[in-house]
Image: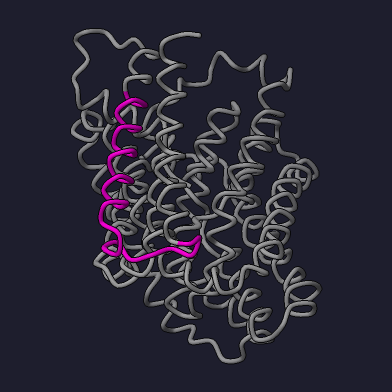
Amino acid sequence: MSKHKVLSWISNVCFVAGFVIPFVASGFVGMSLYKRPGITILNAVLWIAGLILSYLSHLEEKKYPAATPAWIRVASFITGTPATIVFLGLIWGYIYYPTMQTSAFVTWVNVPLILSLFVCGIMINKSHWLHIIKHPAVVGYTVLLRWVVPAAIAYVLGHLILSRFMPQPAGNILSIGMLVLATTPTGPASNTMTLISRGELALSVSVTAINNIIAPFLQPILLTILGASFVGHIDSSSIFKELMEIALAPVIIGSIVGGYFPEQIKKIRPALGAIAVICLTFIMLANISKGSGTLLKQLWILPWMLGACAVQAMGCLTAGFYLSKYLGFTMKERVAATFNVAVENASLATVVAINHFGVLAALPAVFYGKLQHVFGIGVFVRKFQNMPELMEEEEPVAKPEPELANVR
């Protein structure tokens, strides 16, 4: 066994032990950060050791040139292991939710969300806006699929399963949570999946940009039309105002900054992905801590949510791939459409759901945020990477840049 695999294996043991020990000590229900300080310190020590070992494993595997600056190595490590780092934040928020749910992480959760969307905006450059102008039909059809398919599937799931077979009001609250998720703009992770699948990256980034711009206008309307049957009155104006502040403005400003200072941005690009991962970690820590108390008291929700989110994810991915075929897309464009239809900005959906419909409504976004990666990467990316027609076009595809492999 190679050295980097040994280090990786030991680091995983540290991560697992760091979770199991405090979770068992809390009686499997979570506890205050200060209830058993010795356990908390042991948890932190194990996870820090795990991160150090994981970083050393990363260095062994990548074999960076000696001249590579330390900050680039660290940034590359964070960007290359987003699942591990985000998972640690999520578990910390879950175990110590009685303390975390009243901490600054929750009070100021919009700050890392805005920063992550600002980073997303920086990634949008002039070439992506030009792509929209040169290919309006393909971009327009992809945007249309993005807003119709997920909302339709979520609406059907809500009426046929969640609100019908689950006790009320939980069924209706989870149903509106599914709609909030489905009407949230495309997540930046769609660009990453498109890139590693050898799809049309320019189309993916262009559609992501448009979806973030029109989301403040479309999401309140769709929620009002489709969600009224679940929760009655919806304050669409409040949702519109919030989305303008925390979603649209950061993307627009980021895009302007990236356009005016391309050379300066290019110099710090390796750090952008790391910033996005850290922001996502804080967002998930805050959101899971607010929802853990509710989830632990209603564990019967778990199988329902897993089932509904799995259907949503596979339904959107499949529809994006096959419907785009009948619209005349090339295979590379179909790859981009697949992920842009299905991959949600689960972090933004979680914040909107909590602020307007309560903690329970945020659970679909929390579960879907993980499942969209499981099905997107585990099923569809693998499928695309083995397609001969995409392999033949591998040469023109740019090498993945670290900052793209960052967020959900």
* Magenta segment boundaries in residue numbering: 27-55
Give the percent coordinates (x, y) of residue 400.
45, 25
Q: Quadrant of residue 306?
A: bottom right
Give the percent coordinates (x, y) of residue 253.
27, 55
Q: Is residue 119 above or below residue 262?
A: below
Q: Quadrant of residue 363?
A: bottom right
Give the percent coordinates (x, y) of residue 237.
44, 84
Q: Quadrant of residue 332?
A: top right
Main SS, magenta region, reads helix
Residue at image x 37%, y 47%?
Answer: 120
* 39 left or right of 3 in image: left
Q: Is residue 264 above or below residue 144?
A: above
* 289 left or right of 316 in image: left
Residue at image x 30%, y 56%?
Answer: 112
- Closer to us: 283 or 232: 283
* 375 left or right of 177 in image: right
| Residue 110 makes an appearance in the image | no
Give the percent coordinates (x, y) of residue 312.
70, 57
* 109 left or right of 382 in image: left
Q: Is residue 176 above or below residue 341?
A: below
